[in-house]
Amino acid sequence: MEVLRLHRKLFFLFLLIIFLMPQVTLAKSLHTNIPKASLPVLPAIIENVITTDENLLPKVELANVRWLVNKDSVTGGNNLRLVIDTTGPVQVSSKLDDTNSQVIIDIPGATIGKINGWLALDGDIADQVSFATIANNNSKVIVSLSGVIDDSDYNVFTLPSDVAANKMFRVVVDINKPLPKAEYNFTPGLQNKVIAIDPGHGGSDSGAIGPNKTQEKTITLAVAQRVQALLEKAGAEILMTRQTDKDVYGPNDSAVDELRARTLVANDNKADVFVSIHIDAASNLIAGGTTTYYYPKSKYDVMLAQCIQSNLVVAGKLQNRGRRPARFYVMRNTEMPAVLAELAFISNPNEEIIINSTQFQQEMAQGIVKGLDAFFALAAKKRGGL
Amino acid sequence: MLSVQKILLLIIISMASLTVGCSNSTFPAQGNLLYLAQATPEKPIGTGTTTNVSPLEQETMQVTIYHATNDAMFLVPEIHVVPKNDHPAQTAIELLLAGTKNADLVSVIPPDTQLRNVWVKDHIAYVDFNDNLIKKNTGGSTSELLLVGAIVNTLTEFSNIEQVQILVEGKKIDTIVGHMDIVEPLSRSEKIIKKL
């Protein structure tokens, strides 16, 4: 009887706390995404009272879950971060299920404690997360993805507690947004391919200017014209966004009108691929090398960037800065695989000299053509979609 | 019986305070990752340098800003300890515009760029620069990526800032030098930060 009365009192106290708690939670974490994760407190606490009552032994529990979808300002890629607070240090193991559509995380020696068994996400990268205590003392966390990912697309790790920063022990799950499936039926070879070539900048927009006054727009056009000649010889149809030193949309046009005009050349004429040619710049003169940028809109974009970058590096023998994702307008707004190649740094005095040599311009043009040929050969093997 | 009740009450109170603690905790920091970090309590991290400006008795705050590596591959956080004030976002941008004394790092801000205004509404920071941000820009994809990354990452260090809208002379801009699409508010970039 007394035990029952006690429980009733306990329950009352808890109701009081619970009534106060969500307000505190909401007020403290104003972020739109986070309250969703921290709201389901009520049933969890009651459950926890019972377990604490029955078993006073300290043990590790999952304490809180929150999540956020981050849209990277530089790469343009989305990734989901799920954070599980734990009351003590834990070790985790993780794997993908057979269909690559679930991330399964095992946390041995920790029960799910106060955590609700189920958490709905926004569906951008994952639909839901489920939590279960298995074999009395272990937690299994299953993240159900909205698409299919590879092993390289997720990362699970732990972080220690940080009292000064008011942070508990944590299990962190990072998942990249899976690329949407794209279906192209590319054939091998350059013959009859429709290829949009975009010499960066032009006309009223000189682009970057080197220490010896070389203008980016001059070099990009020179290389683009060499690419055009090589590709036409190989039987491809070339769409040049500009053939001369001019603005594509109009003199002193807005930046976005200019960029849109370039993407329309490719979109309106149903180009197979889009290649924008640029020369890079940085505030530090020692920075140098070759980079190929892509926007992660499909796996073909990554593939095209990889093919062109590796051939440009072989051709130009400059530092390989890699293929990199970037939220660039022309790649985001073209309807086909697209890249923006930064051949070298005009701000680097040595490279400024190199880019003015016709030999370098011809070799880089050949590098782009070889890269395109490699891309179509590889893409043809992936017919039916990637 | 009474003592049992007291013990249980204690458990409840301690659990309640634990829950408050949980809801208080900000999104986690990992290595050089400081997502939703509060302006003040974050510890110095990474290879960033610490500039101690404040006299001993004055209350201080930590501000984290971002500069580029010399090879222009990545951004690196630089921690400053400055006298506490009620406009830390403005202070952070002013420190960013002031450049760095660290020889291993290079400022990504075009010369003579000035802050016109910065304010926060609905977790979006609106940061307004004068037009030297565009006019004095060296151009190039790399410098544009580093510039946008440095501005966004510096401001998203604050727990109340989730996204950043870059303005020039009071207006939204589509791009800075013709590569990036920055018409929308932008989120933090972890990938541009150098991993230790």
Image (cartoon, rainbow, N blue to C red):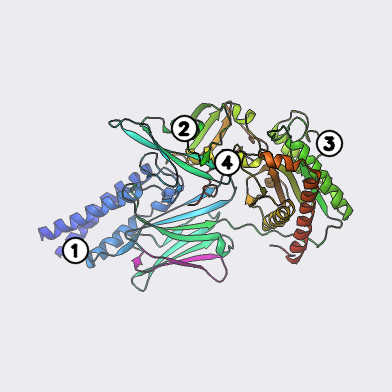
Tell me, yes or no, whether dots 1 and 4 are on the same chain.
Answer: no
Separation of marks 3 and 4 at Cα, in angstroms:
30 Å
Number of the label disc, if any, that sits on residue B95: 2
Q: Tell me the amino acid under the disc marked 1.
A: Leu
Number of the label disc, if any, that sits on residue B146: 4
> Does residue A18 belong to the magenta stretch?
no
Q: Tell me the amino acid under the disc marked 3.
A: Thr
Q: Which residues are magenta?
A: A90-111
Q: Chain of mark 2?
A: B
Say which element carries label 2.
helix
Q: State yes or no: discs 1 and 3 in contact (Cβ < 8 Å).
A: no
Task: Give the residue drawn at x 21%, y 60%.
Answer: A7
Of residues A3 and A191, the one nearer the viewer is: A191
The image position of residue B132, as x and y in percent, is 60, 27
- Quadrant for the C terminus of chain A, please: bottom right
Q: State yes or no: discs 2 and 3 in contact (Cβ < 8 Å).
A: no
- For label 3, the residue is A244
Kindly report which numbered mark, 1 or 2, lies closer to the viewer in this rendering.
2
Separation of marks 1 and 2 at Cα, in angstroms:
62 Å
Q: Chain of mark 1?
A: A
Say which element carries label 4.
helix
